[in-house]
Amino acid sequence: MHARMRPFIHRFVYRVFCLRLRIDQPNRLASFNSWLFGIERSRPISFWSNDHGACDGSDLYVWIKSKVVQAGMQFEVGATTLQCFPRVLGYVFNPVSFWFIHDREGQLRALLAEVNNTFGQKHQYLLSTRDLSPIGDETELECIKVFHVSPFCEVVGRYRFALHERAGHQRVSIDYHDTPDLPEPLLRTAIVTQATPLTTRLLFTSFISMPMMTIGVMLRIHIQAFKLWRKGARYHSVPQRPEQELTTNQQVEK
């Protein structure tokens, strides 16, 4: 779900499917390879490590641990789950992928939002609580916006992330506040998922119902951009990308 609140209401909801993969268990991931789904293999639905992290095919678990160290977070990384779109018929575009980073005791300690824009750029926001206490239901994580995503929004303000668990559904919400003068965000975004064990049968059903899902993601982005332009949304040129590819939420505006 995506909703723009000002200067007009523009809202849309799309149905998609995604993967949640334990990147700290590469041997277990390999066991899911089939005629339909492939890890580092060309299949109708596939996952490739070079779509994420350093984008060079290197070990994703090593990469995410290096980012935790880079951010100065003092905990030992344990179970790590990556939520993302797979490649469908060889194509994928992930507006945002989420890395759920737990410690060795199983507590969720950090969330990394890996963001891609349609101009071929990417950025990561690594989020934690101020004291590195476990992230729970309703925990709010805040960070400065430094990366250009929509051409109808400036690179100002901040994001507020929150996680919610309800009756088997997980909701990740992202509110974008462009100005501290208004309590209401400019944009509200939410991704709601229902986790189901990965089986060939379920994946085949998803594929049949949405065979062009990932191409549709890119197509819908441009359709919605056209609608915003028609409504009078102001266009902003692509600014220079941030010098650093990683932003932590310790860098919050005062």
Image: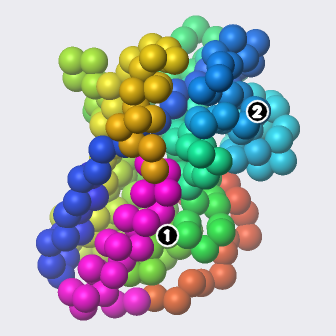
Front position in the image: 2 or 184 = 2
Quadrant that contains the C terminus: bottom left
What amino acid does circle 2 point to?
Glu
Q: Nearer the viewer, residue 233 or 63?
A: 233
Who's the residue at 75% across and 32% down the image?
41
Q: Is residue 148 visible?
A: yes
Q: Viewed as shown, does residue 83 lie left or right of 119?
A: left
Residue 63 percent location from the top left of the image: 78, 37
Q: From this viewpoint, is residue 53 visible? A: no
For disc 2, the marked residue is 40
Secondary structure mostly seen in the magenta stretch: helix
Q: Which residue corresponds to mark 1?
A: 149
Question: Which residue is at the front of the view, 57 or 234?
Answer: 57
Relative to 98, say whether 134 is above or below: above
Q: Nearer the viewer, mark 2 or mark 1?
A: 2
Q: Position of residue 35 (x, y in %)?
A: 65, 23
Disc 1 secondary structure class? loop
Q: Quadrant of residue 126?
A: top right
Q: Which residues are magenta?
A: 213-235
SS under mark 2: loop
In the rendered image, residue 121, in percent from the top left (x then y), is placed at 65, 67
Residue drawn at x 84%, y 47% as measured from the top left? 56
Residue appearing at x 45%, y 35% in the figure: 207
As shown in the figure, which amino acid type bears the numbered disc 1? Answer: Val
Above/below status of 204 relative to 187 = above
Q: CA distance from mark 2 to mark 1?
A: 28 Å
Mark 2–mark 1 CB contact (< 8 Å): no
Question: Which of the 4 image quadrants contains residue 16?
Answer: top left
